[in-house]
Image (tube, helix red, strand yellow):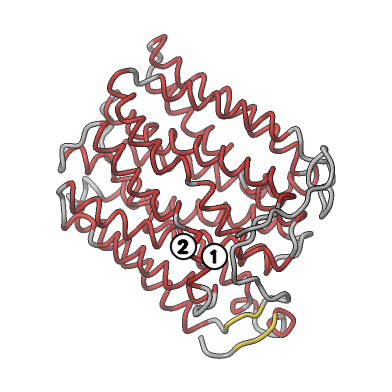
Amino acid sequence: MRQRMTLDEARSLPRWRQPEALLILMAIGMPLAFSTWSALLNNFVIEVAGFTGVEIGWLHSVREIPGFLAIGVIFVLLFMREQVLALVSLILLGIATALTAHFPSLGGILFLTLLSSIGFHYYETVNQSLQLQWLSKERAPKVLGWLVAVGSGASLVAYLALVALWDTLKLSYDTVYLISGGLTVVIAVAAWFIFPQFDAPVAQHRKMILRRRYWLYYALQFMAGARRQIFIVFAGFMMVERFGMAVHEVTALFIVNYVANMAAGPFIGGWIGRFGDRNMMLVQYAGLLMVFLAYGGIYAFGWGVVVASVLYVLDHLFFAMNITLKTYFQKIADPADIAPTAAVAFTINHIAAVFLPAALGYMWVASPGGGFVLAAGMASVSLGLSCLIPREPAPGYETILGPGREMPVA
């Protein structure tokens, strides 16, 4: 990755070497490691490490520390280009995933989780920035929808392999983690040599940027992060602890989930372009409110695994609509703010993530359904905030309450 060229110059390259092709390749590489890690995690920590809700809560709190510190991306970008940082982060994610099963103790799992999380969160931060810089406002919803489908497809391939081969070949956690992490490393290294370095049209600020006119975007990010933690930490954990799902059963559920996301991703992007960010956010948060209330009903009314599985898939479909946050910000942002604001937004998104999983771990022991009721309340707040988005957001018209002003940063 030595040659540098502008986005205009990149249009002369073969399509498989253009910026969108790199975004697609990275969208394939990341889930191979992360989705496999997620699919095996609950079974691995329960069967091998003997985790309870308390330990899984602490694990996810540790996992979210790098997300909270994503603001550090701004300082890394002082000496490393975003495209380079994205690929280095993918390599770190792959290596940490490959080594996961080698350290089946609480300390070992927490340490490797921290390393993989640094790779994952730094990759996600700069990847979001690159998407918004490399894609035009007109193409962004459609391409982002397709990237959701591509990532879901990569996860689907990994899960199909798990279902087909886990019992047949008597696979071990060590083997699966090593292969999935290794594939992510190979893809990142290949991307390093195949693609030139692409220069975005507008140079990015290399300092922390907070603007008052972005306050609604910040608020939506905070609520999304807090709400997401409850699902990530306990939805899958519930499937194993309450319903006794085995590895191949959990993976089969993930397959159904990602088939749904593959099918829906392009449509979601098209709907955002057609109906607007505001309307799609209203649909998303209203749907999430219903899903989390229904999760609480599993414990209140004793609903079974079928209901829980349907809710799991529906939650992921609504989560895929989070690309509305990206397209909303792209419409209101100063182009030079995209990289630093992506880092700030990731930190805001993870404020609650650092302490909430550990606290909810103790809540889970006392009242497992309580966390999902709390998530329903968070979805209600997000629904109210999304009502403040204009139908046609633009710089100076970020909310229906009027123009914002810059927030000074010391």
**In the picture shown, does residue 312 fall above or below 31?**
above
Q: Which residue is found at the position 51% from the left and 82% from the top?
A: 194
For residue 365, which quarter of the picture?
A: top left
The answer to whether residue 112 is left or right of residue 305 is left
**Position in image of residue 165 (x %, y %):** 26, 51
**Position in image of residue 275 (x %, y %):** 79, 41
Q: Marks 2 and 1, Cα distance to the nearest angstrom?
A: 6 Å
**In front here: 59 or 163?**
59
Residue 321 seen from this side: no
**In front here: 387 or 406?**
406
Circle 1 SS class: helix
Q: Mark 2 is on which residue type?
A: Tyr
**Position in image of residue 292 (x %, y %):** 51, 24
The answer to whether residue 333 is left or right of residue 73 is right
Circle 2 SS class: helix
**In front here: 60 or 215?**
215
Residue 286 seen from this side: yes
Q: Quadrant of the C terminus?
A: bottom right
**In the picture shown, does residue 64 fall above or below 400?**
below
Q: Which residue is found at the position 36% from the left and 30% from the top?
A: 360
Q: How many C-alpha atoms fall within 10 Å of the one at disc 2: few (<14), some, or many (≥20)? A: many
Q: Which mark is residue 371?
A: none
Q: Which residue is found at the position 52% from the left and 90% from the top?
A: 2
**Position in image of residue 247 (x %, y %):** 27, 40
Q: How many C-alpha atoms fall within 10 Å of the one at disc 1: few (<14), some, or many (≥20)? A: many
Which residue position holds label 2? 122
Asked whether the beta carbons under mark 2 and mark 1 sit within 8 Å of each other, the answer is yes
- Residue sitting farthest toward the top: 301
Which residue position holds label 1? 126
